[in-house]
Amino acid sequence: MAEASPFMQRALAAARGVRGHTSPNPWVGAALVRGDRVVAEGATSPDGGPHAEAG
């Protein structure tokens, strides 16, 4: 399997950071990239909070 891009690695790291704290929602991370720079990132909040793409 090919290595994930640095941007995908940032999103995966954000997701791993909330693993076990988001039930019943999945643990998801997101990175918003413009050009070659991450301008925002987030992860799913505990139940009732924002989703990764809104964090």
Image (spheres, rainbow, N blue to C red):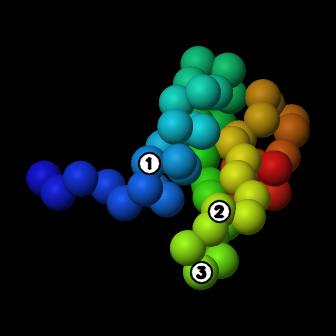
Question: Which of 54/26 is in front?
Answer: 54
Which residue is found at the position 86% from the left and 36% from the top? 48
Tell which of 39 and 8 is nearer to you. Answer: 39
Residue 43 is tagged as none
Q: Is residue 23 visible?
A: no
Give the amino acid type for the residue marked by disc 1 in the picture.
Gln
* Residue 17 vertical position relative to residue 50 in the rendered view, above or below: above
Q: Residue at x 53, y 48 (%)?
A: 10
Residues at discs 3 and 2 in contact (Cβ within 8 Å): no
Residue furthest bottom in the image: 35
For label 3, the residue is 35
Q: What's the residue at 73%, 64% (across, down)?
A: 39
**Secondary structure of the residue carrying numbered label 2:** strand
Q: CA distance from mark 2 to mark 1?
A: 11 Å
Disc 2 target residue:
38
Q: Residues within 10 Å of mark 3 (few under 14, many from 20)?
A: few
Mark 3 or mark 1, which has the lower sequence index?
1
Indicate the amino acid at tag 3: Gly
> In whole angstroms, how far apart are the C-alphas of marks 3 and 2?
8 Å
The image quadrant of residue 33 is bottom right
Identify which residue is drawn at 60% across, 39% down.
14
> Is any atom of residue 31 visible in this view?
yes
Q: Amino acid at mark 2?
A: Val
The residue where tag 1 is placed is 9
Query: Compared to 2, does 20 lie above or below?
Result: above
Outermost residue, left direction? 1
